[in-house]
Every structure is written in structure tokens, then in C-alpha cells.
Image: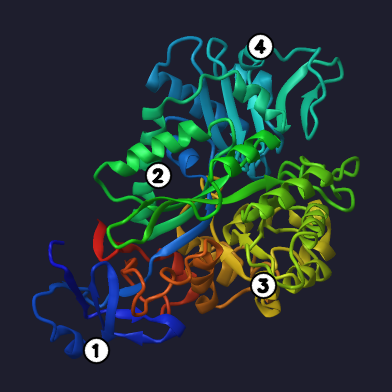
Amino acid sequence: MNSPLCVIHNAKVRLAGGKFCQALLAGKGRILKSGSNEEILETTGAEKIDAAGALVLPAFHDSHLHLQWLGRREGMIEGAGALSIEEVLERGRLLIEKLKPAPGSYVQGAGVNPDLFTAEKRDLNRDDLDRISTVHPVIISRHCGHTIYCNSLALQMAGLSERAPAVEGGTIEKDQNGRPTGILRENANAIIRSSMPPMTGPEMEDSFNRAMRRALSLGITALGSYDINGPDTDEVLGALQKLYAEDGPRIRLTMQCGISGKEKFLDEFINRGLVTGKLLREDETGGPLLRMGPLKLFIDGTLGGQTAWMRKPYHDKPETSGFAVLDKEPLEYFSRKAAGAGMQVIVHSIGDAGTEAVINAFDKIIEGNRNPLRHGIVHCQITDRPLLERIAQKNILTFVQPVFLADDWHILESRVGKELASGSYAWGTMKKLGIRASYGTDAPVSALNPLLNISWAVLRQDPYTGDPPGGYYPAERVDLQNALDAYTVESAYSSFDEGCLGQIQEGFLADLCFLDRDIFTIPAEEIHKAKVIRTMMAGKTVWER
């Protein structure tokens, strides 16, 4: 687009407040006017886009995912959708046959979910992965990313033997003879990862670039991404700065930054001014492109891996209640220190014990019921009414992923019992209590597609199969308007962008997505079938079908 003005007409445009119009005028990257076709087409000297009846929405804003990890999935063993151990192993052998990696080079995979296996529902072990290769170290992560499976060579290269020590906040599982099984959970994963060669700058750039293109094709122009974890800060920021200096459409990226549980990395962020809101790159309109975001901490693991920290033992594994990967004292200390430097703090929490610990920590840094730094809980899955009421009272944000139910409804009651399951993934209750919930996918843990995610929020059932009939605890559904707001307005609020993103109104950035069908009039069961046909950032088309 070369014209400073752009007219979009013959559309159904969803404006702020849920109203609709036919046409928009954008200029210098911002929305200038909305109205009827006749009103807007009067503009002279503007480039005109005939939307041909498309539904035009504010572009989607995924509040939490892993952009670099998403881009790296190409070239890995893809475990998503595999229904048996044998299917995973065969995919691994075929990938090696196709790529022909040199002996001794790492072969990685991701996306495996044993809970969905149709036969033997168990984690993969070293003996399984040795059937993929004995000359390549093979590492495959569970779909949640918190559990990894290693073959014998990967264990050997990491120095893990019968003498492998206990790991605080993690486990190296061993058999009855003390031999590592190849299954590592939570903090123990770092032992394996540290033995692998680091990614090069060009490899990082390529991964980010692939993931950004994928996001734009799905109508996503902004996101919060956890890609920095302390030791790799300079490498990741260097790759991003280089990438954003080059031509090509770029996502509005808010970096969610970890510290690997080490105070020295938090000190580095603070001392270097790499704190929430630090702008590293802006677009030609002055809108944010690349920016530092919140400190990201972890209190526990995952439901599927039975490492989410629960107040009571798991129903199907009563010998454990999961565990804290970060003790309460350092959680409170890091939160207080970051907040004192003006940093937003968001904490991964899935179990109810974990969420209670996070609320307790936030109680000490949120004065009264105000939360000006917008501290939040990422995932916030296993809850009861009193926990949610405390979250609402303190104005704590939540970063939730409705699409997680695609996997978790199969196991939730068996893990935590029916009573606790009925008050979990409680998006409807969150809305009623006034909790600010933004939507994301945690991709590549789940599919990046916003429309599939919205479908799970609205239906609470698989749109492809209709399971479970009637929806999973349907009282916790939200309506389409609220689901869209969670993916736009609330996500913008979570990154302090409510003044320029998330809505279509005068003065806001012209970040838009065009859908091929009207999701407000079709049956809710067909929302996931809608396709993005155009994505715009600051009034420019950055992707078109």
C-alpha cells in the first residue's frame, strides 16, 4: 500500500463496544473514521479495499506463547496427534531417514501426549527412544514442555547415570535398580538442555521469522512470548534486534522474561533497564513492535505430567500432590524485587496449591485492591470459588488458554476429582467475578489458531467430534462477544496497550483481520471453520490468502 489513506468498504466491521459498521478509513496507520459505505467512500485519494462482505475484527493478540519454540518445531519429530508409542517412534525414524543428520547430532521432538494414546497410556522411556536411534541423542518433550523423554545416548552425553543426584524442583526418574529411565521432569530438564549445543543467531532469527509468518496468517498481530530465560538474554535479544532491523512484516512482540530461578539475572534486567515497557523497536506510526514485558516465574508444572502443585494428592496417583518448582520464599522475594523496579510479574500456575501460593505472594506486593503493575497468573487452571474470589478482589490478571481443554477434559476428573474439576477452567465464573482474563494458546503446546481457541471457550467441547456431549461443565462457557474481547481488549490490557490496540475505534492502530464468514451468525459449532483471508498491521496488508 503506497497511499497514506486506506478505505475498507463492503465489510461487516466489529467496532468497540460490539457495534458494527460497513466501512473504515485508515491513515498513517490509525483508524480515522468508521461509517457506512457511502460516508467512507467519499474520501478522495485513498486506496480502496473491497472486503466483499468479510467480517473485519481487531487483529488477535495472543497473550502467552513461545514464539521461538513454535518456529523450531519444523524439523523436529512431531508428536502432536500421535495415538501410540509406536506411532511416535515411527515418526522419529522417518524424520531421521528424511533429514539424515550426522551421527552424534541431536534429534529433537515435541508434542507427545500419552493421555491420548489409544493403547498403552504411559510416558516414553529410554528403551523406547533407543528404537528411534542409538547413534543420535534423541530428546522428545511432552506436549506441555515440562517433561522430556531421552534415549540412552542423550542421557550419556548429559552425564546422567545411576549416580545422578536429586534435583530441587524436578525429578530424574529411575527404575528399581537406580537406572535413569530417560524421563525427566521440570527443573531436571535443564541438565539435558545444557548438554546440547546452543542455537546460533541465524537459527534463532529463522525460528522467529517462521513463527511470525504463521501468526500473521492466522490474524495475529500482537503477542506476549516467553523466549528469554536469563542466560540467553543477549543472544535472543540480539537475534530479535537484527530481525526487526530488516525488511518484512514483524509481529508486535512483548517479551516475557525468565531468570532460571537466579537472582543475578533479575539484577541484570533491572540494572540494564530491561524492565517492563522498555521499547526496543517501534513502527513508523510510533506503535510498539519489540518491547520488554513482564518477569515470568514458575511455581509448578503441569496437570498431564502430574507435576502441577495440588493441595491434595492426585486421585489417580495418590503418592504425589505434585510439587513447587520454586519455593514460596524466593517466589515472594523475586516478585517483591521485580515490582520494586516497576516490573510486571506473571507466574505460571496450574495446580490449586500453586495458585494459592501465587496469590499469597501477590498479597504482599499489591497494595489494597489496586494492581497498577498488572501482575498475573498464567494458566490458572485448577481452582475453586474462594481462590477465584481472591483473584478478583486483588485485581490479579489471568492469562488463560481455553484450547487446553482439548487435551485436559479427558483426564481432569481422574486427576483431581469431580468436585474440583467442576470449578476449574472456570472462564464463565472469571467473567462473572470481573476477573480480567486474556486469551492465548501457549503455542506450540496447543494449536496457534485463535478461532479454535475461541470455539473451546464458547462450546467447551471438541468442535470436530462434539465431545463431550453438551460441553464440559457448560456453566463455565462464555459467549462469543466475551471470548473475542478476551483475545483482543483484554490481551491488549495485559501488555498495557489498551490505548492503541484491541479495538477498532478512532485513533487506534489499524491492526485488523478479515474472516471469510460471519462468526456471529453461523452456528457456534462452525466458528473453527472460519478462515483469515487478510491481516493488516498499521493499515498495511501483511498477509493475504
Q: Which residue is mark 4?
A: 156
Compared across the picture, whether 416 is left or right of 17 comes to right
- Labels 4, 1: front one: 1
Which of the marked residues, 4 or 3, is nearer the chain's N terminus?
Answer: 4
- Labels 4, 3: front one: 3
Farthest residue to the front: give it.
271
Q: Which residue is mark 3?
A: 435
Q: Which residue is mark 2?
A: 211
Crowd band around label 3 with a 10 angstrom C-alpha radius: few (<14), some (14–19), many (20+): many
Q: Amino acid at mark 3?
A: Ile
Marks 1/2 in contact by CB < 8 Å: the verdict is: no
Distance in Å between CA atoms under marks 4 and 1:
68 Å
Q: Residue at x 33, y 39 (%)?
A: 243
How many discs mark residues in the rendered view? 4
Q: Nearer the viewer, residue 69 or 335?
A: 335
Q: Amino acid at mark 2?
A: Ala
Q: Which residue is mark 1?
A: 36
Q: Secondary structure at mark 1?
A: loop
List x then y, in percent, for residue 287: 36, 61
List x then y, in percent, for residue 187: 72, 32
Quadrant of the frame with the C terminus: bottom left
Q: Nearer the viewer, residue 2 or 417?
A: 2
Crowd band around label 1 with a 10 angstrom C-alpha radius: few (<14), some (14–19), many (20+): some
Q: Residue at x 64, y 68 (%)?
A: 469
Which of the marked residues, 4 or 1, is nearer the chain's N terminus?
Answer: 1
Query: Does 419 appear above or below 197?
Result: below
Q: Secondary structure at mark 4?
A: helix
